[in-house]
Amino acid sequence: MVHEMRRWKQRLEQTECEAILRQATSGVLALIDGEGTYAVPLSYVYQDHCLYFHCAKSGHKLELLQEHPSVSFCVIDQDHVVPDEYTTYFRSVIVFGEMDVLKDKQEKELALSALAHKYAPKHSMDQIHAYLSKHGEPCLILRLRISHMSGKEAKELREKQVEQGS
């Protein structure tokens, strides 16, 4: 179920959300646990309206995903504390969707290459491929197919953009 944002004037446009997802380097994945929820910080890459993550071939996260593939992922783009105003100037994006494990070898290699390029942008494709051939097999790639995303920013940031005419 998609809930409408209460403070809709602070809502980020889809293109702004996607720009944040491309630029940020980590976020927090929230999963459903039989005892409540479980959240874990992860690195990721955003491509083709999906998020890709790498992980070990076993663990609590994978156990939870087998039972409940519905997840959310939150990325904080800005969090500037302003003590004199008792607030923060924030900008964040939350995505919702279904998570699965990539089975297709070619898609897994593309996702691993995208992750490597994002986190080691100065490395050549030959360096990346050499590393992945040596270390890529022991990991899994998870794909979050985004069904909905929303972004929000502090009203002060939105007002500043309006003043600047952007």
Image (spheres, helix red, strand yellow):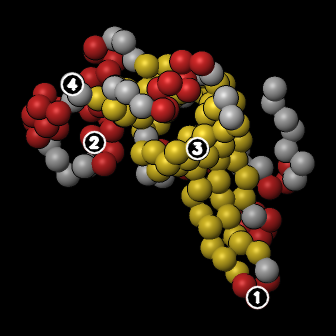
Upstream in the sequence, badge 3 or badge 2? 3
- Left or right, 18 with respect to 24, comes to right
Q: Amino acid at mark 4?
A: Glu
Q: Can you identify the residue that label 4 sits on?
A: 137
Q: Can you identify the residue that label 2 sits on?
A: 117
Q: Determine the residue located farthest toward the top in the rendered image.
A: 104
Q: Mark 4 packing: few (<14 Cα in 10 Å), some, or many (20+)?
A: few
Q: Can you identify the residue that label 1 sits on?
A: 84
The circle on residue 108 is: none
Q: Can you identify the residue that label 3 sits on?
A: 39
Q: Secondary structure at mark 4?
A: loop
Circles 4, 1 touching at the beta carbon (< 8 Å): no
Q: Mark 1 packing: few (<14 Cα in 10 Å), some, or many (20+)?
A: few
Residue depicted at 13% across the width and 37% down the height: 131
Quadrant of residue 91 in the image?
Answer: bottom right
Q: Amino acid at mark 2?
A: His
Cα separation, mark 4 vs mark 1, equals 51 Å
Q: Amino acid at mark 1?
A: Asp
